[in-house]
């Protein structure tokens, strides 16, 4: 059985992410925040790539709030 500490460290930094791809698909200019409504709508999209990117963005948003506390 693996221990919980066996998780790879900094796995998010090592992921192959296309920065700005979600913003480009949602037509939000660089430097502006993606509105929560657009993000929620994209998470329910029929396009699987857009859906994955939106769900990941929502997850990162939650992670950032947890660290701020």
Image (spheres, grey):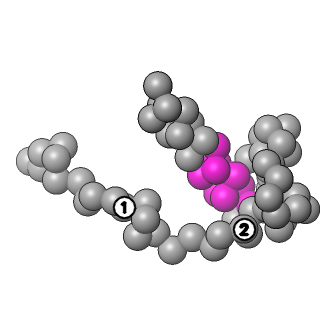
Residue 39 at what x, y percent from top left?
78, 45
Q: Which residues are magenta?
A: 50-58
Task: Return the residue nearer the eye: 12 or 32.
Answer: 32
Pointer 1 residue: 11
Pointer 2 residue: 20
* Position of residue 52 in the picture relative to residue 45 (left or right): left
Residue 4 at what x, y percent from top left?
18, 43
Magenta run includes residue 46: no
Q: Determine whether the residue tagged by mark 1 lies in a helix, strand or loop.
A: helix
Q: Main secondary structure of the magenta part?
A: helix
Which image quadrant for residue 31?
bottom right
Above or below 8: residue 43:
above
Mark 2 burial class by Cα count in 10 Å: few <14, some 14-19, many 20+: few
Q: Determine whether the residue tagged by mark 2 lies in a helix, strand or loop.
A: loop
Task: Return the residue nearer the eye: 62 or 46.
Answer: 62
Please name the residue shown 12% across and 49% down the image: 2
Which image quadrant for residue 65?
top right
Q: Are marks 2 and 1 in contact (CB under 8 Å)?
A: no
* Position of residue 41 in the picture relative to residue 7 (left or right): right
């Amino acid at each position: 059985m693996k221990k919980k500490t066996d998780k790879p460290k900094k796995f998010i930094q090592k992921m192959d992410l296309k920065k700005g791809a979600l913003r480009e698909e949602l037509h939000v200019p660089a430097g502006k925040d993606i509105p929560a409504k657009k993000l929620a709508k994209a998470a329910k999209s029929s396009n699987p790539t857009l859906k994955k990117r939106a769900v990941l963005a929502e997850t990162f948003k939650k992670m950032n709030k947890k660290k701020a506390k």
